[in-house]
Image (cartoon, coloured by chain):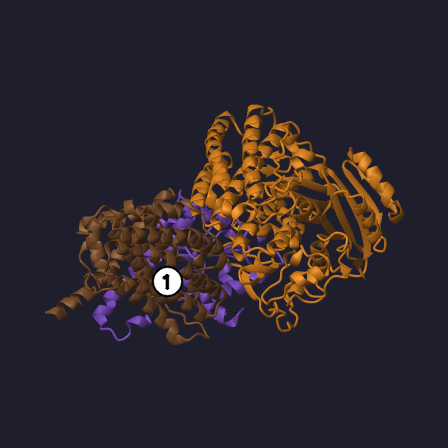
Amino acid sequence: MSVVLALVALVLFPGGLFVIFGSLAFEYADRKLVARFQNRVGPRWFQPLADLVKLLVKEEIVPVGVNRGLFNGLPLAALAASLTAALYVPMAGIAPAWGFRGDLVVTVYLLMMMTLCIGLAGANTQDRFSLIGSTRALTQLFSYEAPFLLALLGPSIAAGTWRISEVNGYAREHIWMIVTQPLGFLVALIGLMGKLELPPFDAPEAETEIVSGALTEYSGRGLAFFHLGRDVELLVGLTLISAFYLGGLGNPLHFILKTLVLLFVTAGLQSLFARLRIDQTVGLWWRAGAVLALVQLLLLIVLKILGVRL
Amino acid sequence: MSVETDFLRIQGSVAPWVSGSRTAENRLDMDTSAERLVPAVTALRSLSWGYLSAITGFDSGTAAPSDGHIELLYHFCNGPAVATFRVKVPREDPSVPSIGPLVPSAVMYERELAETMGVKVAGLPKKRQFLSDDWPENVYPLRKDFTMESAAATREVGPAVGSEEAPGTFIIPIGPQHPALKEPGHFELAVDGEIVTHADIRLGYVHRGIEKGAEDRSWVHNIYLMERICGICSHIHATAYVLGVESLSGVAVPPRAQTVRTIFCEMERIHSHLLWLGVAAHQAGFDTLFMYSWRDRETIMDLLEELSGNRVNYSVNLLGGVKYDIDGKAADSVRRGLDFLERRTTHYLKIVTTDESFLRRTRGVGAITFDQANLLGTIGPTARASGVSRDLRVEAPYMAYRDFPVRPVLDSRCDLEARFVVRINELFESYRLIREMLDHMPAGELAVPAPRKVPEGEVISRVEAPRGELFYYIRSTGGVKPDRVKVRTPSLCNWAAVLSVAVGHKLADIPMIMVGIDPCFSCNDRSITLRRRGSAESWSWEDLRAYGISYYAGGGA
Amino acid sequence: MAQSTLKGIPRALRGALDKVALWSRINSPWLVHFNSGSCNGCDIEILATLAPRYDLERFGVKLQGSPRHADVLICTGPVTRLARERLLRTYEQMPVPKFVVAVGSCSITGGAFHGCYNIVGDIGDVIPVDVYVPGCPPRPEAIIDGVVQLLTKLKGGAPAKAPEADARLGGGS
Ligand code: SF4
């Protein structure tokens, strides 16, 4: 029985198909919102699906001089990592499929895989644009992953556990942590946008500076996997943040409402700001993000030691 | 100081090196020779008067290769005044010294002469720069004996003399189809980490050979061709051309026609500046601003369409007048459109001067100092944003600008932000001008007949395009076709400034800096007048620096 | 348009998959823009189709920076001597299936620049063109219509081939 359940969890829900379609829906919502903010009509509802399928059936050109295995394997690894991460979060407001002590750390690492794979993919293709793009992706890895991680630590320290489901449970029974830890929330949200290279943090693929960043040479399947992987990450990231900071996720309704509100906010941020230069991104993060998150963390620990109930 | 006293002063100081000089309205022509050119230019420079605006060459010979001569015209401009050194060189062996060491910006024009006219300019780098590698030897398209057959040949191409990568640098080619550039152009930037250490530019991808093409078309047909030099500033090209031709044939254009032309010029400036604002915002990654400014730009496009029936190439001009009238009803819709745009423009001005994330990309970035701008012969809004007051509408009013004076818009901050502010403030000035012209539109004819043949003579026609001074030299031998049409477009002058400020900046700033001058490749390429193709041969930054002209890298090659 | 991905799959299923592939292709045309010598008139009108008034994203159209990511090459201008090589290279870099839309009179015949010494020909002389959009420049509506024509053509079956142009491609004319 448990084998069947495990399979279902992997292939249908909450893993596999559900996550894929869910994340496509999120991409649609994101693009539509940005288009509306820009006074445009925006894409149709099936647009992300059409894009995905089209890329899948397109010719995949493998440039000469690259390591074929890596070239084909990296997109798969990136997608697999983000799909795996989806198993540990309270997807759709339902308790995570898997969980163990410390799964938060594993999830965060899995979410980092994506950036790493993009960076490697760019370095592998030996195209000049790709190389610069991947250097930038890796630079950003250091600049936003750390604050993002620190920002997720806040709620878990408050809850006293490294287990995502327990943090979620704790969040549901207490006052929303966006109120008690507003800084952490901000850092987490913007950190997520940085991870996903959404504007204004999209320097790694800043179209006008270096064509399409690390992925310049990918044409078909590889590109599709990277795109999908990023969509899944968006979904996972939003789920995590709403589970931690917006009073936890108890049921699908919670999930839909809270993540959509977050999406609205990120889409707004995307349309409002000019792209940050890469050094400005890094500087901003280390100076503001990391410091803010650290300050908050210290405060939490002190309060905890003092025995203040949060 | 009046133009006449200026001219007297110039004549006085260059007298030993010129064999004769003539003045006409705002023009001073001085004959000199290849040997005396350098001291003559030195004397002129020592007066610190004006800037080199263009070098024209024309072939006065017949089809026989051995007779006749090539005449070179070095035009220096200052406000309305144009001082020209004329040098005649034999067609057999046309050679002149380079004035590059004195006037850095000359190098680009000299290359053009060397390759299109076959003038040997001593002291220029040996490399081929403007012509494609396989362009046949000794075939010069702007000579009168040029035939299409002779161009069909090719020459042996050696291995591409590409950009040798210096160790430790990393060369990023930008273009020719790079999303930062809606038009093709080729840049090579060497970067060290994220810092640009070397910038190189090559144009020519959209060089079509229009100057030669003009010699095969009738005076009227050419209006159509000139309009298509650039689709963004189409009307101003046609206007510069017809103004020149009209003055050659002595046609007095009715005031109403002049006013209509001027209104179109200003409307074109509005559409061009809004377009630029959007593209520049896009370079900054600020797509929302791009979308909004392009949405609002549709207002002016609609008005242009309402007045002329076309959105882009309006085809307003005739020799001797205009095709379209602006009646009361049309004027009202223009006013309404302008009211809307004025509100939006106020909003944009606020955004570009207050939005933090935008200012990070523009404030203090890409500064061109007053001296640099002055020395490099920068023109148009780029110059005005560095405090250099160069605007022909103000200095040498033409058409309806005589009756409706323009207030110059200046800014002394020199950086990218200033370039945004200047252009946006110019929008307000254009709104005001158009309203005024609509309110005081002179009555009368729209066009008078112009002769089919244009009397012998030559004329210089300079107008203020959205990007700066546009220079036309037109020469007629009394026939139904021009003998020579030389076009020097604004962007060409401003490339120097871009390349000089690019080095030392972050790679990420480069698109913004490039776009800051509102470059227009199709304009450049027609004026560079040469094609080149395929393999990498470019004039490197280092070559030029060695040449004492670190700014004019590559001269569009 | 055989897809290597579909090899070894039963016939019936393959038919269905083909339909899905076609559907996705029709609904997700990504463009890459190439200017081979135009006056910019056409280029600004292409850009205008992306702006709010016309908003091509409604139809799934996206402007891409890299030819590797694009399905449709949208060309403007006559082909100059220098741009010819680059145009060919851009076309070759695109993964199949790929289509070409030539925008503007001068991309069709050379237009105003016909006979100028640096023009080697029109777009069709260099790469196979699927749809021509005439006009100098065509209105944004006409450009959108051109893209729609292309999609309609796709629905009707395989896009028309231009064998001579293919041969030229190989021969390098
Ligand atoms: S068709 Fe007309 S508008 Fe378009 S690029 Fe050619 S000349 Fe310019």
Q: Residue at x 76, y 49 (%)?
A: B74
Between B131 and A2, the one nearer to me in the picture: A2
For mark 1, does the 10 Å Cα neighbourhood hold few (<14), some (14 to 19), or many (20 or more) residues?
some
Amino acid type, residue under disc 1 in the picture: Pro
Between A137 and C72, the one nearer to me in the picture: A137
Q: Which residue is mark 1?
A: C159
Q: Residue at x 47, y 47 (%)?
A: C45
- Dividing the picture into quadrants, the one containing residue B77 is top right
Residue that protrudes farthest toward the right in the picture: B16
Q: Residue at x 85, y 43 (%)?
A: B21
Residue B491 locus on image (x, y percent): 62, 48
Between A66 and B323, the one nearer to me in the picture: A66
- Dividing the picture into quadrants, the one containing residue B556 is bottom right
The orange one among the chains is B
Q: Residue at x 46, y 29 (%)?
A: B336
Task: Kindly tell me whether residue C5 is visible in this rendering.
Answer: yes
Residue B420 locus on image (x, y percent): 54, 42
Decide: is C28 above or below B365: below
Task: Kindly tell me whether residue C136 is visible in this rendering.
Answer: no
Q: Is residue C126 left or right of residue A111?
A: right
Residue B72 locus on image (x, y percent): 77, 52
Residue B509 locus on image (x, y percent): 53, 53
Q: Colour of chain C?
A: purple
Decide: is B246 above or below A188: above
